């Protein structure tokens, strides 16, 4: 019966196999039994069709006491393992509330938000950017818990990888741009920050709720500088003529030093480009344009 209710979305299967290979295939194969186990253990019943992102299956459920929630199941990795830690630290303030967590599997029971009211559906992009900025200001006001993955280590690894990656960018202007991103990161890497970062706060990771106008979901948390948080709001719903307005608005709301924030934002371009090169793909034209605009080119 459970298996019929939770038919695994084909797109989730495809993404898991693409990203995680055999581990991803094993994860999705085991999902029906894993769901069945947690429905029984936590006394839940399924209350709607499954939802999913790239990495997780999310099931609307109702608890025995009538609480409406969602059951989130995902493959544990270096990004997802910190999610419940961050959600506990925020404790429902500007982020979805964690209700239960199973550490061995990473399974979480979360408060149910309104998936039909997503910030990506707000037509006024400036309004949406200011919502993101306000959430980030409050979320990053919290120091990261001890043991959280650190931006400093990620940034140092990027700088180590850059010399070997640059020759794999054929276009000399693009190669120079990415080299300049690395130079910017080199200027700030010695002070990576200690705030609790969401790292992936784009417009589809902000949902409405009855208790708050907007709440953040799906963090990939880090300890670091809030300037590293601005990229998703520039890249998603991209408009080349709006890059400076968005960047300036967010740095003002968060009270960030503009040059440090620019360096860490260029670090996101460097990071994404290194990932693309590793996968055998060219740099993203959209991402490169954001870099050019931030560097005044």
Image (tube, rainbow, N blue to C red):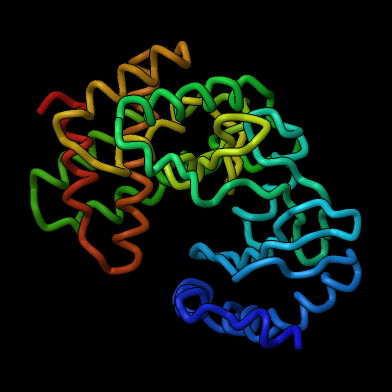
Q: Position of residue 279 (x, y in %)?
A: 34, 67
Rendered residue at 30%/42% (across/down): 235
Q: Is residue 227 above or below residue 121?
A: above
Q: Tell me: residue 140, above or below residue 121.
A: above
Residue at image point 73% right, 51% down = 110
**Residue at position x 19%, y 37% in the image:** 239
Q: Is residue 29 left or right of residue 37?
A: left
Mark yes or no: residue 267 visible.
no
Task: Please state the horizontal and vertical placement of residue 9, each as a whole percent of the image.
Answer: 52, 78
Task: Name which residue lies at 58% across and 47% down.
Answer: 114
* Residue 28, horizontal then vertical, whole percent: 62, 80
Return the residue nearer the eye: 255 or 150. Answer: 255
Tell me, yes or no, if residue 6 can be seen here: yes
In front of the other: 214 or 197? 214
Total marks shown come to 0
| Percent position of residue 58, x then y | 63, 63
Residue 256 drawn above or below residue 273 = above
- The reply, left or right, for residue 234 in relation to residue 52 is left
Which image quarter holds the N terminus? Answer: bottom right
Q: Locate the C terminus and report the quarter of the image it occupies.
A: top left
């Amino acid at each position: 019966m459970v298996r019929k209710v939770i038919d695994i979305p084909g797109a989730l299967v495809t993404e898991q196999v693409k990203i995680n290979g055999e581990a991803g295939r094993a994860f999705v194969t085991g999902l029906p039994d894993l769901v069945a186990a947690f429905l029984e253990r936590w006394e839940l019943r399924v209350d709607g069709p499954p939802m999913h992102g790239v990495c997780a299956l999310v099931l609307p459920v109702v608890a025995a006491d009538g609480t409406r929630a969602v059951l989130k199941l995902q493959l544990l990795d270096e990004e997802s393992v910190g999610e419940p830690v961050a959600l506990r630290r925020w404790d429902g303030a500007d982020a979805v509330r964690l209700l239960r967590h199973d550490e061995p599997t990473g399974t979480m029971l979360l408060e149910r938000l309104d998936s039909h009211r997503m910030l990506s559906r707000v037509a006024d992009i400036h309004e949406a950017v200011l919502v993101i900025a306000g959430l980030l200001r409050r979320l990053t006001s919290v120091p990261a818990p001890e043991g959280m993955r650190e931006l400093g280590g990620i940034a140092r690894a990027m700088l180590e990888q850059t010399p070997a990656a640059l020759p794999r960018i054929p276009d000399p202007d693009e190669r120079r741009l990415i080299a300049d991103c690395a130079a910017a990161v080199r200027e700030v890497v010695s002070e990576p920050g200690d705030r609790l970062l969401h790292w992936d706060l784009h417009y589809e990771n902000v949902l409405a709720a009855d208790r708050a106008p907007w709440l953040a979901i799906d963090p990939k948390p880090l300890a670091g500088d809030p300037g590293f948080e601005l990229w998703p709001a520039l890249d998603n719903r991209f408009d080349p003529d709006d890059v400076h307005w968005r960047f300036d608005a967010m740095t003002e709301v968060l009270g960030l030093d503009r040059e440090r924030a620019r360096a860490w934002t260029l670090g996101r371009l460097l990071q994404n480009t290194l990932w693309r090169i590793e996968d055998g793909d060219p740099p993203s034209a959209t991402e490169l344009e954001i870099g050019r605009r931030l560097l005044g080119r």
